[in-house]
Image: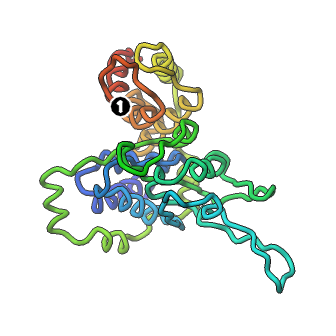
Amino acid sequence: MDIQEKLTALVNQLNTVIVGKSDQTQDCVACLLAGGHLLIEDVPGVGKTTLAHALARTFGLQFSRVQFTADLMPGDLLGVSIYERGAEKFVFHPGPLFAQVLLADEINRASPKTQSALLEAMEEKQVTIEGQTRPLPLPFFVIATQNPMDQAGTYALPESQLDRFLMCISLGYPSRTAERELLCGVDRRQLVDALPSLLTAQELLTLQDQVQAIHAAGPLLDYVQDLMAATRSGQWFIQGLSPRAGIAVLRAAKAHALLAGRSYVAPDDVRAVLPQTIAHRLIPTGDAGRGAQEQVRAMLDAVPLP
């Protein structure tokens, strides 16, 4: 099976679990191929956690799940050192963060202190505990689910942490046809448990290297810079994007191009990933009357194609 067939099989397998959401599943695969972290934001019960489980199993990665609650402490994630009498010393016991995929379920139900414990891990692929830096397994991904902020018992993620998520997607309610399939079909948990792994960790790292090797021509880079400048103009958003966000857009577009079987990035790749990659980093201007994703799409239509 060549690379393209394997990538198609990945997306198709996810679509058997999350029915009627092929665009979102493709975004998820592109996000992980680009080496980014994924935030899935929606109301409870639409399949956020199921999708995260299915991603980890399909990519063949060792994963751990943490249910974020108001009383979760940073040590519950990172691990603790415990004195062992037999060894006559403190021995570090790693927490669930030391996995290739951390499923942070309902991440915005934990306190800001616990949320911030993930910052170094997400950016540097390492954590500093008791003055000692400990590397995390590679590849390392955080797949987080988040409930809408108007629900009780939620804490807004700080902007610095939102910026660490390469993509933020929303599943939304299923269509009537997809919902009928869910009502009549096999339980989703049973489907996820039966999913085979289609990649190994080493194969995924190789694919990530191939994503980085996808060619981006000069006019394409001009287009990305034009879009970044548009976010900073004050016309669309209160505050513009940072250079790190521009790099994230390019990485996501390269992954989208690889999934499409191309060795170069096209403007359509940038347009396909832009709302999911930047909307969670931006606040629309007060008179926009639109959500961040709708505002990004309006801006896309206003910026000329190369």
Q: Quadrant of residue 134?
A: bottom right
Where, quadrant-wise, is the N terminus in this rendering? Answer: bottom left
Q: Is residue 114 left or right of residue 266?
A: right
- Determine the secondary structure under disc 1: helix
Snapshot colouring = rainbow
Residue closest to the eye, 78 or 171: 78
Q: Residue flagged by tag 1: what amino acid is it? A: Gln
Residue closest to the eye, 82 or 39: 82
Q: Residue at x 42, y 17 (%)?
A: 306
Judge whether residue 296 can be spotted in this image.
Answer: yes
Q: Is residue 77 left or right of residue 30?
A: right
Residue 42 in the image: x percent, y percent?
34, 48
Residue 203 in the image: x percent, y percent?
54, 59
* Category of crowding for the residue at label 1, using alpha-carbon neighbours closer than 10 angstroms: few (below 14), some (14–19), many (at least 20): some
Residue 64 in the image: x percent, y percent?
52, 66
Residue 129 in the image: x percent, y percent?
74, 58
Residue 99 in the image: above or below residue 87: above
Judge whether residue 26 can be spotted in this image.
Answer: no
Q: Residue at x 56, y 47 (%)?
A: 112
Residue closest to the eye, 302 or 287: 287
The residue where tag 1 is placed is 293
Residue 57 in the image: above or below residue 6: below
Direction bottom: furthest residue: 86
Residue closest to the eye, 105 or 242: 105
Q: Residue at x 58, y 55 (%)?
A: 205
Q: How many marks?
A: 1
Residue 263 in the image: above or below residue 96: above
